[in-house]
Image (cartoon, coloured by chain):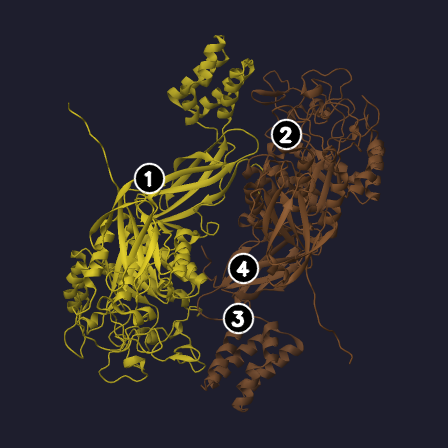
Chain colours: A yellow, B brown
């Protein structure tokens, strides 16, 4: 129901996620544009303001809301800080503006306005009551002029003058203002929440000794190479002690040999749990040195946050009340019948002791934040309650707004979206299983152009320790280049799991899983193995850094390519100062030649004008003319092309000095 | 924020207008379909119910909500009565169903389930605690079986059996249920709110004596003819005494002669105001006889509700506090500078006495409802506050749910829609100014396929006393047939203003207004004037009554016609038992031949099958085959065709008796 005195209607406010239940996501430094329908009955003038504040500020700031068209109003406020902001809208009938408008029309039509001027004088005196000091005095003076004996012409000039309009606008009568019935939230993340290239590695696989564990020091030694490839975030699967009870052996076998390291996701042993580091990797001080090394190279470290424990985890001993238990009191291992996970105990968020459990999870995150970690990749968030995540992320971000959470949520679409709504900064997506033109176009239009874009940032992983996609298994090196080019340009956020750069594609037959997965084994890699695509990745990341268009998420647009195997799309920076077009042959096996429909008008280029096309991967230039262009992409050579386009500036002369 | 224990997420509920601020509109006798996303973390089973009640019932009824696909659930409840309904959703983790599912999978995989059976027994005992009588006893008995010493096979049969599933489903554990955080409203109007043909007439123009007023008796004498044309609602502009001060003369001139009747919208004189009838039309008893005559012919009478008064209205004397007043205390007439309306006083909904004014408006409507009127066409609702309308319509409909309100809102789109949201049953639309193919397609797709369809029913008027559209002025008789056919088939609600059937199209040059408008003059009409289209209107209305497809509003779909001047669309009844296709040549001047793409698959007809096409205006039949058909529409003959389509039933033999 509308309130009885709610004369101004405020509706259809943007941005607003699920009736204001959740925050929209933006980034620090942006202007937050706000739109709303604001109207009332009849034809009277309205005034409106956008009210906004940081969540921890007591008072609202105000910014103007201005009429655009069709009862739609627009305003904006600056997301100057990395913080959570609140905003709402207030609007009121602008009695003085209505009066001024009517008097102007009547005077223009030669009608008598004496009565109107007297009414106006009354409005001015009311305005003086709201004003103070000189302004109040001046308003009373002008009221006297309007009501006085001066010439009609002079009185009218005062009535319609700019001075009076400005004075009255400064002291509006808001006694009949309508407040929008909700306060809406916007979370302004730091830029890295929107623009980053992730590199995932197992520290224990970074060593040089066969059959033994690599260390933080080994991993630190690899950082310069990863930085040279252009990655921003180095993400580590769990680094904690690994349980021994029911430890998994190679190929996820049920029995581990005495020297098998076990899965790092079986967290916890006698040496400690979620706040300890695995002794084989080093000490906490070694981890600190690893963080420092990354920081010095301009990279950040992301840790895995996996809420599950091995039977040997201290919590199992100290807090059996946090777990699912059998009738005999013993703790249950994880199951998804008929599958069993005997090396893992899940935590029971329905237990009477769940409140303590929530606090402990917060304590764990705070521990790593104190070590300097600011990015967490959360394992299986879709098996823990949504209200828990909403609480935890807010608790952490209210203290440390720069903390970024990536949801590993390869789950049902509604649940994946809900995790983003409750606060995850980034989300894994179904990119991994979108290979062909129609499905890529549909999925990325949905991600970047539907309302989902307001709260979900898709981080496109080409592969993960759990997923070696079919296309990579079958398509070899060209497929790796195709998927890298797509991931790096479809989204401003993408990631690879190490081995991708080596085109490692040995899978378990019939499955999308790695053979000899390093989840269960010590591994040593030759990081310069022949056939690697390290130069290609370095080039892609360099292009991303040089082109602001590729650093934004919602600016993806698809264009027409004639061939079913060629995807053609583009991105432009918000200030239009930079734009790129990307064409990718999605077929790793065959070359395809196609016509492209280049959106030249968007670059300010006329059909009859030549323009410069700079292909950024090969760093070659061509002159093109007209929207229809033919392109051949051979996966054996280059399956993708990234074009920067510039009109050909032409002047016969400039600033002639003769 | 989500509540801490809100384990089940309920979102994206349909129907829901503006986050539940406003009611969705449906009709009595319908099933109200309800959809929602219902999900939680993980893979556990859920259960959900739809809760609903009439607004004046104390307790909720419950109907099942069933899983459809992709975490979307569906239910429905019957809108058995003409009333306002509330509904909401409750969902909870179905612990027993999850347990049953897991045990089934484990057993199928040959795993040990003894521990599970013991846990199940505990669930059954809890269930017994929620149950009563025999059911409780039986559950305890079954719990004993599960936990007992019987064979594993037998215990499993009980665990997975239908009896146990049904018993446990009857006594669900809702202790951790989530309630959707809103109660949503649906208003179930009677059918006439959705399906009606309106006929507007000035009673004073129904007489036979030149220069004098027709009466209610004269108007009653015309009702059999109007009923024979097939109209359902006879709508009368204001029937109240007309003010004399500043009365308008012919052609809206500023000075009326002594015998000029004035505009009926200048309501109120010495003889009375909004609850009086104009003495020239007769007495209240005469009006009652007019109502009775309409009722006997199966028609209803709609009255105009115009909140504005002439200077002579009793309210101006008795309640000067309800009006806008000058500094000297005199009442202001209406203005929209530079236009002046000296014969009208607007009411001031901002005055301190507005509460009394609201009550008086309710009293006026109640007065006419007591006389037997159940339909009100509201004049200029967009100049009165939206909260007022929301309050008034709810106050009236809570007493008299069968009252229908039509909003005359030729105003800005957002305001027009907002009036429908706050409760108006029907709305005037921009149909009057949508003449051509693209604009008709776009506008009616928006009206009938966007969310607007949930709360706004467009009543398509071909003309009004204020609007003689250009196309009718220029296009003559063919244009009248075109607009009638469009209005009668694009919407289940349409109306004409009398004179339309006579193809009266004398306009004021350069304006969309009638010359010699009967708003300001006594008129006498020859209702059988040559060139009239009464037979055509009677045929259209008969087709509407015979074809349920044309009695629904949201079922409009556009199909392809090759020619830019031919609009092709169709409607099917919700039960698919009736469907029509309509083709209209929108050009009143020239014949056009075009190909139509007939949606034969929707009629269950294959491309190689013949089908019967029954053109309902001419009552002729043809055999067609294939989707592509050629049609010629000559406006001089028949500008529109309405097709009923039936597949050709063919069987070599049936029920052979040999």
Q: Nearer the viewer, mark 1 or mark 3?
A: 1
> Residue under mark 3: which chain is it in?
B
Task: Give the quarter of the image for residue A206.
Answer: bottom left
- Depth check, mark 4 against mark 1: the one in front is 1
Residue B315: percent from left, percent from top: 71, 25
Q: Residue at x 59, y 81 (%)?
A: B140
Mark 3 surroundings within 10 Å by alpha-carbon count, few (fewer than 14), some (14 through 19), many (20 or more):
many
Query: Closer to the camera: disc 4 or disc 3?
Result: 4
Closer to the camera in the image, B320 or A602: A602
Q: Are marks 2 and 1 on the same chain?
A: no
Tag 4 and tag 1 share a subunit: no
Separation (CA) of disc 4 from disc 3: 18 Å
- Which numbered disc, 4 or 3, marks the residue that appears first in the sequence? 4
On the same chain: label 3 and label 2? yes
Instruction: Identify the residue position indicated by label 1 in the image.
Output: A606
Q: Is residue A561 left or right of residue B538?
A: left
**According to the image, label 4 marks what residue?**
B36
Query: Which residue is under mark 2?
Result: B353
Give coordinates of residue B533: x percent, y percent: 74, 38
- Distance, label 3 to label 2, CA atoms, is 56 Å
Mark 3 or mark 2: name the one nearer the start of the chain: 3
Above or below, comparing residue B186 to residue B287 in the picture: below
Q: Does A31 sit above or below residue A111?
A: below
Instruction: Check contact, mark 4 vs mark 1: CB within 8 A.
Output: no
Q: Which SS class for mark 4?
A: strand
Q: Which residue is mark 3?
A: B94
Where disc 3 sits, the SS reads: loop
Residue B562 placement, left or right of A505: right
| CA distance separating discs 4 and 2 | 45 Å
- Residue B165 location (% of width, % of height): 58, 77
């Amino acid at each position: 129901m509308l309130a009885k005195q709610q004369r101004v209607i405020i509706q259809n406010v943007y941005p607003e996620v699920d009736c204001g239940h959740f925050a929209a996501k933006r980034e620090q430094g942006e202007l937050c544009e706000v739109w709303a329908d604001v109207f009332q009955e009849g034809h009277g003038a309205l005034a409106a303001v956008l009210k906004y504040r940081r969540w921890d500020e007591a008072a609202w700031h105000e910014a103007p809301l201005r009429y655009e068209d069709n009862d739609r109003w627009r305003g904006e406020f600056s997301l100057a800080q990395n913080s959570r902001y609140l905003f709402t809208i207030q609007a009121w009938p602008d009695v003085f503006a209505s009066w001024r408008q009517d008097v102007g029309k009547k005077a223009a039509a030669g009608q008598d306005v004496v009565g109107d001027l007297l009414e106006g004088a009354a409005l001015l005196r009311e305005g003086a009551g709201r004003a103070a000091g000189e302004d109040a005095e001046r308003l009373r003076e002008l009221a006297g002029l309007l009501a006085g004996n001066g010439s009609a012409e002079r009185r009218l000039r005062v009535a319609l003058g700019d001075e009076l309009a400005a004075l009255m606008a400064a002291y509006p009568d808001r006694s009949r203002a309508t407040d929008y019935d909700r306060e809406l939230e916007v979370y302004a993340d730091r830029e890295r929440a929107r623009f980053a290239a992730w590199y995932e590695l197992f520290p224990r696989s970074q060593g040089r000794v066969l059959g033994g564990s690599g260390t933080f020091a080994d991993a630190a030694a690899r950082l310069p190479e990863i930085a040279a490839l252009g990655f921003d975030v180095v993400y580590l699967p769990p680094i904690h002690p690994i349980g021994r009870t029911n430890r998994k052996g190679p190929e996820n076998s049920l029995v581990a040999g005495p020297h098998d390291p076990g899965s790092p996701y079986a967290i916890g042993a006698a040496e400690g749990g979620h706040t300890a580091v695995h002794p084989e990797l080093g000490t906490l001080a070694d981890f600190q040195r690893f963080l420092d090394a990354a920081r010095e190279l301009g990279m950040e470290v992301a840790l895995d946050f996996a809420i599950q424990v091995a039977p040997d985890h201290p919590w199992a001993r100290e807090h059996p009340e946090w777990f699912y238990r059998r009738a005999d009191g013993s703790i249950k291992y994880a199951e998804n019948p008929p599958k069993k996970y005997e090396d893992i105990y899940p935590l029971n968020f329905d237990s009477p002791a769940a409140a303590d459990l929530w606090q402990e999870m917060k304590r764990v995150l705070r521990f790593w934040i104190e070590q300097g970690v600011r990015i967490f990749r959360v394992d299986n968030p879709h098996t823990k309650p949504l209200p828990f995540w909403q609480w935890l992320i807010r608790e952490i971000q209210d203290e440390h707004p720069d903390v970024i959470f990536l949801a590993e949520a390869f789950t049902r679409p509604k649940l994946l979206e809900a995790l983003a709504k409750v606060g995850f900064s980034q989300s894994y997506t179904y990119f991994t299983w979108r290979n062909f033109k129609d499905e890529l176009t549909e999925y990325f239009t949905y991600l970047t152009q539907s309302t989902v874009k307001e709260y979900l940032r898709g981080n496109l992983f080409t592969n993960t320790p759990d997923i070696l996609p079919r296309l990579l298994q079958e398509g070899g090196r060209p497929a790796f280049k195709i998927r890298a080019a797509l991931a790096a340009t479809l989204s401003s956020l993408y990631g690879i799991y190490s081995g991708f750069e080596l085109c490692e594609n040995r899978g378990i037959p019939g499955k999308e899983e790695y053979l000899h997965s390093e989840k269960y084994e010590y591994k040593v890699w030759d990081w310069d193995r022949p056939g690697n695509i390290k130069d290609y990745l370095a080039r892609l990341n360099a292009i991303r850094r040089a082109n602001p268009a590729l650093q934004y998420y919602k600016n993806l647009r698809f264009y027409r390519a004639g061939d079913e195997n060629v995807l053609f799309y583009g991105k432009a920076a918000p200030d239009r100062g930079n734009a790129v077009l990307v064409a990718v042959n999605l077929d790793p096996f065959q070359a395809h030649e196609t016509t492209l429909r280049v959106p030249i008008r968007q670059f300010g280029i006329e059909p009859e004008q030549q323009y410069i096309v700079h292909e950024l991967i090969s760093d070659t230039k061509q002159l093109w003319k007209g929207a229809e262009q033919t392109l051949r992409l051979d996966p054996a050579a280059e399956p993708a092309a990234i074009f920067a386009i510039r009109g050909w500036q032409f002047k016969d002369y400039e600033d002639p000095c003769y």
